[in-house]
């Protein structure tokens, strides 16, 4: 199947990936990790829930944590639309497409429309949240990485073409795509965006759907090391999973942590901008995937967070994955 093509006249206006909702077993431990290491700000805490935002964000929250027993899961991925009217346009579009939707109540959000995307991931759209003061000019209040803003979410899917077509039909553009060999046209990975950088939502071929990680932008590389130093100083040194390193696609530095419940979070400096219509998708394959960076460890390749009440499906194509362990053992 070829790489999906973007609908440049979408049925409603999505502006960006805006938030993610997770369950955790120990809210206090999660609060310590996300405020002290990642550097998020608490907007509200109570009734077994924690609402956090980046220091540049005026929206009430970009990360919601619900304390719950059992295996931690991702409850929903959230996207913002530009105006409240876009929610009605979205409802009509999905109704016409035969996709079930429902209006839900979310604290600190305006009207919220919930549904599942093309591969069954629970997603929600909202147009408004209560505003909070930005803290980017309050250095005395900033901690750890001082994460600026929520950037993207990366998921695993059994068929990235199906996953991608759902979003390209809604106006998402493709910045990068992965294939196995240079002459393949069947994508194994898609990076898609609505704002002006390479990713709002990413899909890689694996058993899915699963939430692989979500990412926050930090000011610069120094803030990556500040997060690492903070993690080591307060007992989260074992939560580092990968990095510091540099990705091929986007050419951006990164650090990946696992939070106290195993959810994976990436911090990265501001990536390249992609705005103009002639910024075409860039193809990657096994021969050009890395720069000087090492391959990822096996757990980064295979471990992820389940979505609530969402069964896994095996991929249509089984990708050939090359891990750090393979590299160190001299394997191919």
Image: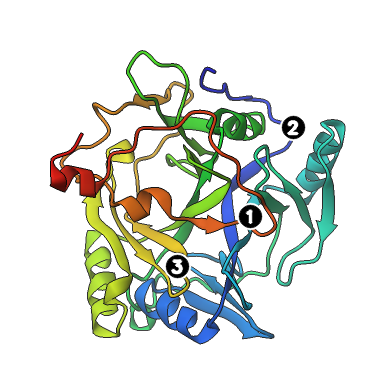
Q: Check disc 3 and report the residue beneath it.
A: 262
Please report whichever mark, 2 or 3, sits nearer to the chain's N-terminal start.
2
- State which quadrant residue 22 falls in: bottom right
Label 3 to label 1: alpha-carbon separation: 20 Å
Crowd around label 3: few <14 · some 14–19 · many ≥20 (10 Å): some
Residue 289 or residue 303, whichever sits in front: 303
- Quadrant assignment, res 11: top right
Judging by the rendered image, the residue that carries numbered circle 1 is: 78
Q: Secondary structure at mark 3?
A: loop
Q: Which tag is nearer the camera, tag 3 or tag 1? A: 3
* Residue at image point 82% right, 31% down: 97
Which quadrant would the N terminus be assigned to in this image? top right
Among numbered discs 1 and 2, the one appearing first in the sequence: 2
| Mark 1 → mark 2, Cα distance in angstroms | 18 Å
According to the picture, the residue beneath numbered tag 2 turns out to be: 11
Residue 31 on image: x %, y %: 48, 81
């Amino acid at each position: 199947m070829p790489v999906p093509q973007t609908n440049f006249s979408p049925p409603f206006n999505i502006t960006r990936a805006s938030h993610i909702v997770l369950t955790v077993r120990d809210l206090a431990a999660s609060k310590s990790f996300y405020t002290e290491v990642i550097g998020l700000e608490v907007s509200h805490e109570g009734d077994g829930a924690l609402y956090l935002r980046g220091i540049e964000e005026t929206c009430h929250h970009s990360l919601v944590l619900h304390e719950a027993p059992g295996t931690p899961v991702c409850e929903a991925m959230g996207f913002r639309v530009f105006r409240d009217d876009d929610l009605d346009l979205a409802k009509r579009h999905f109704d016409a497409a035969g996709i079930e939707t429902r209006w839900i109540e979310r604290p600190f959000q305006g009207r919220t429309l919930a549904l599942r995307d093309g591969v069954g991931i629970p997603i929600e759209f909202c147009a408004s949240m209560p505003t909070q003061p930005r803290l980017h000019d309050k250095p005395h209040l900033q901690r750890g990485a001082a994460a600026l803003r929520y950037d993207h979410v990366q998921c695993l899917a059994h068929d990235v073409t199906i996953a991608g077509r759902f979003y390209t039909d809604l106006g998402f553009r493709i910045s990068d795509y992965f294939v196995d060999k240079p002459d393949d046209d069947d994508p194994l990975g898609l990076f898609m965006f609505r704002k002006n950088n390479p990713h709002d939502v990413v899909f890689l071929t694996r058993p899915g759907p699963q939430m692989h990680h979500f990412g926050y932008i930090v000011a610069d590389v120094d803030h990556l090391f500040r997060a690492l130093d903070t993690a080591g100083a307060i007992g989260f040194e074992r939560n580092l999973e990968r990095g510091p390193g540099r990705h091929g696609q986007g050419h951006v530095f990164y650090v990946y942590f696992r939070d106290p419940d195993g959810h994976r979070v990436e911090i990265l400096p501001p990536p390249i901008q992609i705005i103009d219509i002639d910024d075409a998708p860039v193809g990657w394959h096994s021969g050009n995937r890395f720069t000087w960076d090492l391959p990822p460890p096996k757990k980064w390749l295979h471990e992820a967070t389940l979505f609530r009440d969402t069964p896994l499906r095996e991929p249509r194509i089984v990708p050939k994955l090359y891990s750090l362990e393979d590299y160190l053992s001299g394997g191919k």
